[in-house]
Amino acid sequence: MLSESRELILSAVDAKSDPGRWAEQRALNLLKNRGWSCLDQRWACRYGELDLMMIKPGRSGPRLLMVEVKARRRCGPDYWGLKAFAPMKRRRLARTVACWQSCNPWSDQGHLEVVLALVPLPPSSRPVRWIRVPELGIA
């Protein structure tokens, strides 16, 4: 298995040509290394798109993780991309999560958490930043 820094060197070309997909793949690899399995990727409905839907067994049922991935190329006042996750985007994401759940009724039996993965692009060596979005998750 490649270390995270080695992975960055090997795929820097992909990060330039398609930064969004590269960032999603980096987040996916990190979550898989932490024991999560991918249920779906880039799932879309009329409200929007979910980048990653992950699952992990839990003591009281499955744990579900919805991940919104944001790629960032450079440092600056909004390095972590939080401005791109404004209230309007949060509302769209909440509707998209609800739509995904209605298409997957079994998901009501698990613990749902929504996170924002802020992924710095090469040449940055900063780690991925994970931010919980509690108002969108259903415990």
Image (tube, rainbow, N blue to C red):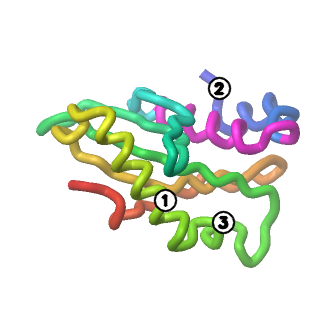
The crowd level at tag 2 (other Cα within 10 Å; few <14, some 14-19, many 20+) is few
Q: Quadrant of residue 100?
A: top left
**What type is the residue that disc 3 sits on?**
Gly
The image position of residue 89, as x and y in percent, is 54, 64
**Disc 3 marks which residue?**
81
The image position of residue 80, as x and y in percent, is 65, 65
Question: Which residue sits at x=61%, y=56%?
Answer: 118
Q: Quadrant of residue 12?
A: top right
Label tally: 3
Q: Nearer the viewer, residue 84 or 45?
A: 45
Q: Which residues are magenta?
A: 16-33
Instruction: Name the main secondary structure of what is drawn in magenta.
Output: helix
Answer with mark 1 or mark 3, whichever residue precedes in sequence. Answer: 3
**What type is the residue that disc 1 sits on?**
Arg
Q: Residue furthest left?
A: 60
**Disc 1 marks which residue?**
92
